[in-house]
């Protein structure tokens, strides 16, 4: 019995003697609860419907005025009809309102949404309803870029954060400091090594996406997505590096990465568009590196928005990369 | 007169309130093995860390090959280091380990040189963690000298080795010391007496005596280096603990 108590006590103090470990252990469930409250406070995000308007600013304002009484309806605009239709197909939007060649307004919805579409149309001044047969796997296509980005997030944070904490603990970094190899060379080698595995992983998933999910990314879309991935890998490696700079033990780094994964996944538009969240939260989430990456990859792969369409995301990711690596380099201890 | 290979001038090293080294001075002018001897916690590793450029002194100065370490970039390509606890990457073979160091030092055919010097040419496919303690230590030393450094720093290289492996490693180091200045931290006085040309006795962070091994024995009229150590450092030194 004494041995049992001694061993159990040892395990308890293993956590409690480390302040970050205690915070992660006790704080993580609270963080998860908080995240879930923030996301689902107004019901589940799929209850919200979105109308995408292809038209001028005046038409958008008129539509907003006409549909002001529709509770839970989000209205956004899109310049390109084909992109709006792809968004409808992938369930990123519930309906598309556009003007046909004769100048009449057309409300386009999926076949299963006819009833809701008729109700919406009755609130508009004029127009006709058009129904489309949406792709059965459309929502899976919507999820697909998020899945690809999750691989990059994990690879970056675990590949750098956990590995660096482990390398410091087992004295590899101390050994490295005695060798004629630059720290930048080492860090880039770590990112490249892990990145090359991510490339294979992403290529395999893309092949499955094309063969099994009916994805048809253009060459330029693929190139833009790769650019966003690459920068995303740098950013999440930087976040991992930063965690390894702030936390000493690899177990706590792993706990914190797990804790970060949930908000990064839920608040980045992986499962649903983030503008279904409260407005202040939507604005905060839109600058998260995970959101920038998911939006950029989704836009490039699914909607073929081109380099101009992802330029803002690339700039945002570049800023994050500079911030995380800049701070890490200042804070990181290579050895004890 | 050429500059000394190693010049340590009134060096101090503090960790907060703890004084790990105080007013340590010595110089080494020629290749050979110099033993840094003292009990655990005496300051041997702190001194090696300073010489390896892993830490900065709190006072005094160090110079290698005539250049002060606080004035010029550390001469990594002229120094080899074997740490007290060497890192072994998971699931890495002896051959891959040798290739890694050959690549880092940029030595053509360096991997083969490392394996030959460590007498592990036939065991290149074996995982490093499967090597015996003596074999692994030979590999670490061979990897640290693949670039033919002028200075080799070793921290307790024979700790945990059986007598035969210890003797073999000592012979290996003697061979290297013909052209290289080897600085070896150890608390094994018998080993030091067998292989060291010179010795530094450190206790409680202070250098108590230094000189050629034979001279230290003669001046203390000691039959062994252990006797000489106690002669210079006093009977209150516990060899498995800190100085009292």
Image (tube, rainbow, N blue to C red):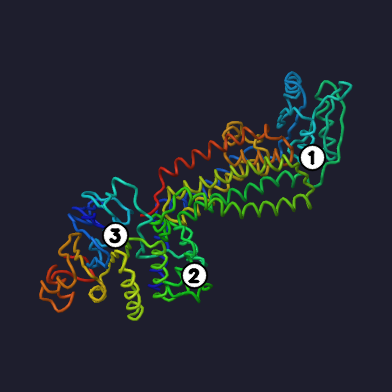
Same-chain check, marks 3 and 1? no
> Residue visible at 39% across and 54% down?
A177
Q: Residues within 10 Å of mark 3 (few under 14, many from 20)?
A: many
Q: Chain of mark 2?
A: B
In percent of the image, x 78 and y 37: which residue is there? A88
Image location (x, y in percent) of residue B200:
20, 65
Answer yes or no: do the residues labelled 2 and 1 have beta carbons within 8 Å? no
Which one is nearer the viewer's eye here, A280 or B143? B143
Instruction: Tell us which disc is closer to us: 3 or 1.
Output: 3
Q: Is residue A69 left or right of residue A185?
A: right
Mark with earlier residue (3, 2): 3
Spatial CA distance of label 3 from label 1 is: 67 Å
Q: Are marks 3 and 2 in contact (CB under 8 Å)?
A: no
Question: What residue did someone put label 2 on?
Answer: B94
Q: Is residue B163 left or right of residue A168?
A: left
Q: Secondary structure at mark 1?
A: helix
- Residue A26 x, y percent position in the rendering: 47, 51
User: The residue tagged with tag 3: helix, strand or loop?
Assistant: helix
In terms of image quadrants, where is residue B153? Answer: bottom left
Q: How packed is label 1: few (under 14 Cα within 10 Å), some, or many (20 or more)?
A: many
Q: Which residue is mark 3?
A: B48
Quarter of the figure with the N terminus of chain B: bottom left
Q: Is residue B38 above or below residue B21?
A: below
Whole-number angstrom distance, CA of label 3 to CA of label 2: 26 Å
Q: Is residue A321 left or right of residue B161?
A: right
Q: Chain of mark 1?
A: A
Question: Compared to B131, does A53 lie above or below?
Answer: above
Place of residue B28 in the rendered image (x, y in percent of width and height, measured from the top left): 23, 60
Q: Nearer the viewer, residue A106 or B125?
A: B125
The label number, if any, that marks residue A89 in the structure image: 1
Check the image and report above or below for B186 versus A207.
below
Q: Residue furthest top?
A: A58
């Amino acid at each position: 019995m004494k041995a049992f108590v001694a061993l159990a006590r040892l395990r308890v103090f293993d956590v409690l003697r480390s302040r970050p470990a205690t915070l992660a252990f006790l704080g993580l469930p609270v963080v998860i609860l908080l995240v879930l409250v923030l996301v689902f406070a107004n019901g589940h995000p799929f209850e919200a419907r979105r109308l995408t308007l292809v038209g001028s600013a005046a038409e958008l304002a008129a539509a907003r005025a006409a549909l002001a009484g529709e509770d839970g309806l989000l209205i956004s605009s899109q310049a390109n009809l084909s992109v709006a239709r792809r968004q409808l197909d992938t369930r990123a939007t519930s309906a598309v309102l556009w003007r046909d060649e004769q100048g009449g307004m057309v409300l386009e919805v999926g076949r299963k949404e006819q009833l809701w579409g008729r109700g919406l149309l009755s609130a508009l001044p004029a127009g006709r309803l058009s129904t489309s047969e949406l792709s059965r796997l459309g929502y899976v296509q919507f999820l697909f870029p998020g899945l690809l980005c999750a691989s990059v997030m994990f690879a970056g944070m675990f590949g750098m954060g956990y590995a660096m904490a482990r390398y410091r603990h087992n004295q590899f970094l101390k050994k490295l400091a005695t060798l004629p190899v630059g720290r930048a060379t080492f860090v880039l080698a770590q990112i490249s090594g892990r990145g090359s595995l991510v490339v294979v992983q992403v290529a395999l998933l893309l092949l499955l996406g094309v063969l099994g999910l009916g994805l048809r990314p253009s060459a330029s879309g693929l190139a833009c997505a790769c650019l966003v991935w690459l920068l995303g890998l740098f950013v999440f490696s930087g976040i991992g590096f930063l965690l390894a700079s702030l936390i000493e033990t690899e177990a706590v780094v792993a706990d914190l990465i797990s804790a970060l994964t949930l908000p990064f996944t839920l608040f980045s538009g992986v499962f649903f568009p983030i503008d279904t969240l409260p407005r202040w939260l939507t604005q905060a989430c839109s600058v998260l590196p995970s959101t920038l990456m998911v939006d950029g990859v989704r836009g490039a792969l699914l909607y073929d928005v081109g380099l101009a369409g992802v330029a803002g995301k690339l700039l945002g990711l570049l800023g994050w990369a500079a911030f995380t690596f800049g701070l890490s380099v200042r804070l990181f201890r290579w050895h004890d | 007169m050429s500059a000394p290979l190693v010049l340590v001038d009134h060096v101090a090293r503090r960790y907060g309130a703890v004084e790990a080294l105080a007013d340590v001075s010595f110089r080494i002018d020629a290749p050979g093995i110099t033993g840094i001897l003292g009990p655990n916690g005496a300051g041997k590793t702190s001194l090696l860390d300073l010489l390896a450029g892993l830490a900065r002194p709190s006072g005094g100065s160090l110079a290698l090959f005539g250049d002060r370490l606080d004035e010029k970039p550390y001469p990594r390509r002229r120094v080899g280091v074997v740490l007290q606890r060497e890192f072994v990457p998971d699931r890495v073979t002896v051959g891959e380990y040798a290739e890694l160091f050959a690549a880092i030092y940029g030595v053509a055919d360096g991997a083969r040189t490392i394996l030959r010097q460590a007498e592990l040419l036939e065991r290149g496919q074996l995982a490093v963690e499967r090597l015996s303690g003596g074999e692994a230590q030979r590999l670490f030393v061979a990897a640290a000298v693949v670039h033919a450094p002028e200075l080799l720093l070793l921290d307790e290289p024979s700790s945990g080795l059986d007598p035969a492996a210890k003797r073999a490693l000592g012979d290996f180091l003697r061979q290297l010391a013909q052209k290289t200045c080897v600085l070896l931290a150890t608390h094994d006085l018998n080993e030091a007496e067998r292989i060291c040309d010179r010795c530094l006795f450190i206790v409680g962070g202070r250098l108590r005596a230094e000189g050629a091994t034979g001279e230290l024995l003669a001046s203390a009229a000691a039959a062994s280096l252990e006797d000489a150590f106690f002669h210079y450092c006093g009977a209150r030194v516990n060899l498995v603990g800190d100085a009292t």
